[in-house]
Image (spheres, coloured by chain):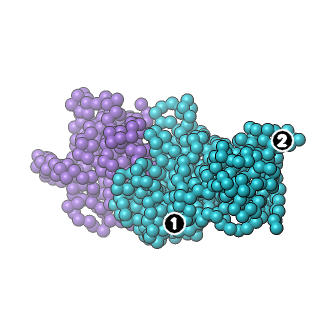
Chain colours: A purple, B cyan
């Protein structure tokens, strides 16, 4: 079932596709897998350890272009990971210390859990760090600014953490290396009551569980 | 011809049983709560008879009576400096003309006495109707330990309230709150916990309920006051627990890594409607505490949160972003297809269904970017903004009888509690006392 295109053509096609996706600047949406639940984001469906044929062959037969896209992306990520694993030093890879990995947060717009282009770039860097530290369990925290109500902010924070996790999983990180938790508006980074504080507080923040 | 009704109420420390027979001389309603607007009924509160015997107690009682009546937004206490008679002639004797002259419609007369038994007091309180010179509208005699003086005053404030409005008073009530842990007890790390506490509606008498150092949120008490459900992060993830308040016996409702938040209890206290995230999908569930069974109510892939029961115990209002923005929807315990309730505004959350009718209070983001308290009827009509469009107001909670709303307003780093009537009139802030209260739930008195 793997593509038989020569590597260069394959690579070029991937670059074009990635460029298109990044340029669109919207949150990444995989084609819907038909099924009993109306879940439009099939990435979450793939979380419980399914990486293989179950994803590539949706029941009922969805549009083939959709499933091809997903399959090719995974192959790209796997080959990228192999490349990274072969690199001897961290210099050409993530270039991050653990402290840097933990200190840079993913920002969100008000009331949104969409990943911006900048967020995705940060996550790609973090992905590399995670790959380089295979024994570390990573927790993604979802946070909100103080505006809005407690319960809804807890749910929104959860959406933010999950969006980050889904993106990392799609980049090739094993799902069981990442846990998510929402703290809603409970733990503000910046105690101020202004736009700058709110902007800093709308975040997904990384933690390591077994440093 | 005057009808003297004299009722003896007896409180003891182990507490309960007051034979509450209040004979109202004339059922004339002076204040219609729903029409009162800004009107404040003037009441006089002169020194007590025999005050010199126990000036401290007399002062404390009068202070609570005054705070209660003024906080209700329906009464004002006339300045004692203007009184012609600084002390009444007797519990049942007033020179009514002198009270009419200072503009009083009611006069509260009191007497305090030390009982022979140590630390016990005898408090007599009588409300006089000046306008009709009916002298006694209501009179009570309370015997209790001295430490119960606040509750005595609250009970009598309720009677004054009832005498003038015909409605049950809100003063002998309590509030469940989430409160930040005191400095120095916040524990290590950057994630300080929050406690759940119980206190009188005016902030006094705070009692810890959950103070294990973890982050504890979203408490909700059943109507009969016996059960408390809440979310705790104590095991690392936000899960729901519920406990019998008296015995402290606790059960865990959810486990797993997804967010779980209790919404509200059914009227009979058997069911808890809640929201839980499973497989990344956050939905409403109905938990049967008797059979320990969870039943799914919604299936939408996005956020469904904050469910609140209607008084009929069947219908539910909740927040969902299934329409693209957080809005209120109505469903029921059968899981019927949710019907959208709110269409105005881009952000409507935290709904609480009135305990007495089809009014729903909620938090909405106004065009000014402020967060305000709104009400709407369950048929979608009658949308009304109650707060001023200039600030952050959150966490509405109905008084047990549904005539008042408690809410919190942001003032810098502080969240301050306020109340208002259900039409938005009579806004008052509570005197600053007691722990800061986030997420208040206004309930009938649990503890004595």
Q: Is residue B432 visible?
A: yes
**Residue drawn at (46%, 39%) of the image:** B413
- Residue B351 in the image: state x and y as whole percent: 48, 59
- Residue B448 in the image: state x and y as whole percent: 73, 48
Q: Is residue B247 left or right of residue B12?
A: left
**Residue drawn at (21%, 57%) of the image:** A68
Binning the other alpha carbons within 10 Å of mark 2 as few (below 14), some (14 to 19) or many (20 upward) gives: some
Q: Which numbered dot is residue B114? A: 2
Q: Is residue B7 left or right of residue B164?
A: right
Q: Is residue B399 left or right of residue A66?
A: right
Q: Is residue B225 visible?
A: no
Quadrant of residue A83 in the image? top left
Name the residue nearer the viewer: A46 or B45: B45
- Relative to B198, say whether B183 is above or below: above
Kind of element beneath mark 2? strand
**Residue drawn at (81%, 51%) of the image:** B90
Which residue bears the numbered disc 1?
B359
| Distance CA(mark 1)–CA(mark 2) | 47 Å
Residue at the extreme right: B116
Name the residue nearer the viewer: B284 or B331: B331
- Relative to A49, say whether B316 is above or below: below
Q: Chain of mark 2?
A: B
Q: Is residue A3 left or right of residue B254?
A: left
- Relative to A113, say whether A99 is above or below: above
Q: Given this view, does label 1 or label 2 mark the residue nearer the observer?
A: 2
Number of numbered markers: 2
- Residue A209 in the image: state x and y as whole percent: 43, 36
């Amino acid at each position: 079932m793997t593509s038989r295109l020569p590597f260069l053509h394959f690579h070029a096609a991937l670059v074009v596709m990635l460029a298109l996706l990044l340029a669109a600047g919207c949150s990444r949406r995989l084609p819907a897998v038909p099924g009993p639940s109306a879940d439009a984001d099939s990435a979450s469906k793939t979380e419980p350890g399914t990486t293989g044929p179950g994803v590539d062959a949706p029941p009922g037969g969805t549009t083939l272009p959709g499933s091809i896209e997903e399959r090719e992306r995974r192959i790209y990520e796997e080959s990228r990971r192999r490349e990274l694993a072969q690199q001897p030093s961290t210099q050409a890879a993530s270039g991050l210390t653990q402290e840097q990995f933990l200190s840079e947060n993913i920002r969100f717009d008000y009331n949104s859990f969409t990943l911006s282009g900048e967020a995705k770039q940060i996550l790609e860097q973090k992905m590399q760090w995670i790959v380089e530290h295979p024994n570390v369990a990573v927790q993604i925290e979802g946070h909100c600014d103080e505006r809005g109500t407690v319960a809804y902010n807890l749910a929104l924070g959860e959406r933010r953490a999950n969006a980050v996790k889904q993106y990392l999983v799609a980049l090739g990180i094993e799902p069981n290396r990442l846990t998510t938790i929402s703290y809603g508006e409970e733990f503000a980074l910046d105690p101020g009551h202004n736009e700058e504080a709110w902007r800093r507080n709308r975040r997904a923040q990384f933690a390591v569980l077994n440093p | 011809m005057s009808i003297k009704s004299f009722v003896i109420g007896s409180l003891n420390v182990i507490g309960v049983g007051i034979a509450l027979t209040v004979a109202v001389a004339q059922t004339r309603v002076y204040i219609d709560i729903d029409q009162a607007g800004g009107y404040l009924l003037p009441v006089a509160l002169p020194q007590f008879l025999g005050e010199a015997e126990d000036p401290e107690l007399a002062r404390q009682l009068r202070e609570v009576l005054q705070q209660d009546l003024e906080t209700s937004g329906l009464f004002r206490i006339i300045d004692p400096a203007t009184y012609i008679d600084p002390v009444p002639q007797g519990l049942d004797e007033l020179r009514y003309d002198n009270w009419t002259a200072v503009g009083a419609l009611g006069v509260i007369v009191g007497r305090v006495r030390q009982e022979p038994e140590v630390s016990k007091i005898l408090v007599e309180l009588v409300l006089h109707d000046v306008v009709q010179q009916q002298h006694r509208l209501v009179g009570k005699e309370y015997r209790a330990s001295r430490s119960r003086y606040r509750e005595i005053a609250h009970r009598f404030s309720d009677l004054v309230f009832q005498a003038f409005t015909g409605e049950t008073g809100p003063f002998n009530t309590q509030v469940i709150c989430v409160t930040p842990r005191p400095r120095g007890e916040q524990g290590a790390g950057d994630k300080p916990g929050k406690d759940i506490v119980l206190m009188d509606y005016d902030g006094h008498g705070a009692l810890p309920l959950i103070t294990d150092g973890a982050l504890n949120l979203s408490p909700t008490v059943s109507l009969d006051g016996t059960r408390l459900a809440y979310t705790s992060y104590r095991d690392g993830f936000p899960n729901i627990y519920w406990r019998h308040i008296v015995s402290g016996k606790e059960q865990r409702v959810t486990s797993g890594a997804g967010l779980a938040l209790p919404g509200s209890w059914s009227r009979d206290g058997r069911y808890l409607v809640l929201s839980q995230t499973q497989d990344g999908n956050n939905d409403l569930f109905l938990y049967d505490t008797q059979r320990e069974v969870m039943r799914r109510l919604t299936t939408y892939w996005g956020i469904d949160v904050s469910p609140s029961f209607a008084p009929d115990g069947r219908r539910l209002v909740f927040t969902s972003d299934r329409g693209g923005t957080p809005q209120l929807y109505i469903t029921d315990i059968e899981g019927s297809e949710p019907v959208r309730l709110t269409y105005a505004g881009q952000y409507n959350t935290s709904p609480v269904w009135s305990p007495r009718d089809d009014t729903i209070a909620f938090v909405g983001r106004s065009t000014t970017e402020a967060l305000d308290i709104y009400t709407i009827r369950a048929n979608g009509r009658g949308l009304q903004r109650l707060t001023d469009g200039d600030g952050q107001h959150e966490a509405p909670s109905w008084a047990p009888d549904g005539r008042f709303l408690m809410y919190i307003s942001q003032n810098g780093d502080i969240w301050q509690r306020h109340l208002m009537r259900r039409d938005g009139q009579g806004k008052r802030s509570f005197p600053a006392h007691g722990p800061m209260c986030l997420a208040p739930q206004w309930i009938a008195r649990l503890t004595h």
